[in-house]
Amino acid sequence: MEFDANRPIYLQICDSVCDRVLSGELEQGERIPSVRDFSAEIGVNPNTVMRSYEKLTDTGIIYNKRGIGYFIADNARDTVLRQQRDDFINNDVPQILKKMKLLGLSPEEVFFPK
Amino acid sequence: MITIDDITFSYGNNTVLKNISMKLEEGKVYGLLGENGVGKTTLLTLLCGLKKAGSGRIDIDGYDPFERKPSFLSLEYFLSDEVAEQSMTAEAYAKNYGKFWNGFELDKFRKLMEIFETDPGQKMNRMSFGQLKKSYISFALACNCKYLFMDEPTNGLDIPSKAQFRKAVTKYTAEDSTLLISTHQVRDLENIIDPIIILDRQDVLLNASLDEISQKLFFDYSNEKHPEALYSELIPGGSIQVLLNTSGEESKVNIEALFNTVHLHKELVKGIFSK
């Protein structure tokens, strides 16, 4: 797996799981690899993957069935969508606005070009 | 659990390690970093019982490594940077020497050799350096030791082998085993080593998990200039700047930049991590 140099790896792993939930590659209720297997697959320290799984569990995207493994939550798609929309509005949009201001572009020019 | 308590070691008049103390917990893959000559290899050889500390104490699960009790020796494996050529095949070597480790699995050895795309039927003295190294890495992991010490394991490995190495280490070590890997090739290993130990001349500058490091230091990759940065380095597309983390925001730890920051601000870094 190729990682972006600038973002903590464990968050990048969370992002990739979320993206795969959104794209439908991972289905709700589906079992995902164990921490060990997943870390071996992507060549990352198991503790890092553990942190990603903990975060995904906290945010309700996956859940742990004790002794069986981790599964994609039933409403994972909605959760991811909600989170990513919030993230887009709170983080990406301000960046875009900043850049537009820097380049002297108006919203009309960018979003409704003739 | 490994406890190193105030050890000293000298080669004649040349004192390499002095007042070194640290604890290594179970189930972690430690990266041991340090400039040439600070005693990384010496520390590994002390831990595996090849050398005796001048003063101080090393305790590994209740054992003093230098007593070299068989029950201790079967708990650990030391993979040296220089590996011996043997006049037998890798498979024969594994069969003969695997007997010394209770947990050794020949099947696992074969699987690892397959991951590394190395033929176990080949004589070891006919192998290239990289192939020989991969045979020994496979053997080391197949011993299923609780403590595995590796000195520069990725030296001499070709490009695909480095990814194979990361995979082999994460897949084939038990959850409670402790690995200590000394390396200069931080890029080869940066995603698998955590915590990071930085050894300096007669000092331990850092022994902290990546999580702790990212709580205390912030790695900024933007183009915004921070005059208060502890360290900055130009990279294509901008710069890496290392600052004290005041906002609590998380960033990705760049191990090379970390290493340089720690070397520029030894006392400051020791101070913020000892809290």
Image: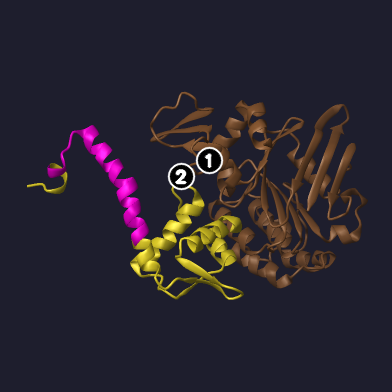
Name above or below for residue B238 compared with residue B72.
above
Q: CA distance from mark 2 to mark 1?
A: 8 Å
The rendered magenta stretch, by its main secondary structure, is classed as helix
Of the residues shown, which amino acid type is indicated by label 2? Ala
Measuring 69% from the left and 57% from the top, which residue is drawn there?
B27
Q: Which residue is mark 1?
A: B254
Residue B257 drawn in magenta: no
The answer to which of B225 and B47 lies nearer the viewer is B225
* Chain that bears disc 2: A
Q: Is residue B81 left or right of residue A106?
A: right
Residues under numbered marks 2 and 1 in contact, where contact means CB atoms less than 8 Å apart? yes
Q: Which residue is mark 2?
A: A5
Name above or below for residue B127 compared with residue B251.
below
Measuring 54% from the left and 51% from the top, which residue is drawn there?
B159
Q: Label 2 crowding class (10 Å Cα cut-off): few <14, some 14-19, many 20+?
A: few
User: Measured from the top left, where is residue B229 in percent x and y?
Assistant: 50, 27
Specify the farthest residue to the top. B227
Image quadrant where one finds the C terminus of chain B: top right
Specify the farthest residue to the left. A114
Q: What scheme was used to colour the molecule?
A: by chain
How many numbered circles does the render carry? 2
